Image (spheres, rainbow, N blue to C red):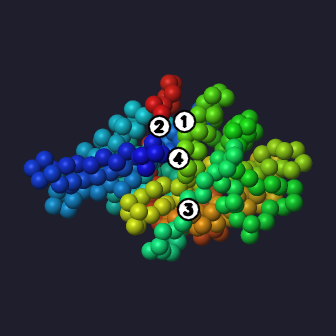
Amino acid sequence: MKKAKSYYIVVLEEVQSSKIVGAATLLIEFKFIHEAGSRGRIEDVVVEERMRGKKLGVLLNQVLVEMAKTIGVYKLSLECKTDLIPFYQKFGYQKNLHFLDQRFEEDSETPIKQWPKPRGDALFNEDLIPSSVEPPSEIRVRALHPNDQDDYLKLLEQLTSVGYVSKHDFEQRFLSMKNADTYFIVVLEDVATSKIVGAASLVVEFKYIHECGLRGRIEDVVVDEAMRGKKLGVLLNKILVEMARELGVYKLSLECKTELIPFYTKFGYKENINFMVQRFEEPTTQPIH
Ligand code: 16G
């Protein structure tokens, strides 16, 4: 967690007993979208039972929202049960997208013997790309490389706002992702033109819960407009679900619009929980990392 430079676990210590009576995590996820910005996630918020009713949950949330603003995230989100929606609305969150997840069997053994190290320029170790999922012959599946900048950013513009990303910003973003070793951005290259025509990310999060387990998130799935209808979205999703399983995540999730629920349901996801999000004005200065 420390190496990834993205985990801010805040605890509340009861002064008298030196016991931890509350905790919450702010997780920062590095992005290429939103000017190579970052998004924040609130995770694992918990207050000791005997300390409930003292507004410690409010305190934790206020602290984390302020920290997220200081860091300069463009949006902050969390998942919660239906009865907690009114609580989180107080801090500025709204329910708009849908949150889908699926769980895998939890093994008591370490999920993966050796975390696969990336080789060469690639963002992640390409051996992880499952050979069981076969792309059409005109498509090559590979990891993102630093010289994919123009193609990849152009493609992301079909998903959301990207804005201006200098070569330096792109390289820094790439480096911070590679250093964290938990960003698996798969791209689909059109063999004939060498252009990137599809991309999707698997981002792995380290947890203490679930036996120091891992959770996975599918992010920034996009297929070039000109290539739609060729099942490339299906291909990307099959690949990432397999990779997540191979890495040993206990749960895999994503957020999507209503019209995409039937598509994602095909890969085993279900809507179990609410997704709440708030957006901030996009920072004009570089975020602090
Ligand atoms: C969708 C994406 C998410 C992406 C976001 C960008 C999938 C499964 N979900 O929710 O990964 O980051 O759109 O939208 O691809 P934003 O710019 O409004 O955050």
Q: Give yes or no for contact between labels 2 and 1 (Cβ–Cβ under 8 Å).
A: yes
Specify the amino acid type for callout 1. Answer: Gly
Alpha-carbon span between mark 2 and mark 1: 7 Å
User: Residue 99: horizontal and vertical position, in percent?
Assistant: 51, 58
Q: Give yes or no for contact between labels 2 and 4 (Cβ–Cβ under 8 Å).
A: no
Disc number lying in front (3 or 1): 3
Quickly name the residue at label 4. Answer: 180
User: Residue 184: horizontal and vertical position, in percent?
Assistant: 62, 52
Look at the picture and state if 274 lies above or below 26. below
Quickly name the residue at label 2. Answer: 73
Q: Residue at x 51, y 39 (%)?
A: 38
Please say whether residue 255 is visible from this viewpoint: no
Q: Please, what secondary structure does the residue beneath circle 4 have? A: helix
Alpha-carbon span between mark 2 and mark 4: 18 Å
Quickly name the residue at label 3. Answer: 114
Identify the mark at residue 37; answer none if there is no mark: 1
Alpha-carbon span between mark 3 and mark 1: 30 Å
- Tag 1 or tag 4, which sits nearer the N-term? 1
User: Is 176 in front, or is 71?
Assistant: 176
Specify the amino acid type for callout 3. Answer: Gln
- Tag 4 or tag 2, which sits nearer the N-term? 2
User: Is 38 in front, or is 246?
Assistant: 246
Q: Residue at x 27, y 49 (%)?
A: 11
Alpha-carbon span between mark 4 and mark 3: 15 Å
Asked if residue 140 lies left or right of residue 278, the reply is: right
Within 10 Å of disc 3 (Cα), the crowding (few <14, some 14-19, many 20+) is: few
| Mark 3 beta carbon near ligand 1 (under 8 Å) | no
User: Residue 260: horizontal and vertical position, in percent?
Assistant: 63, 58
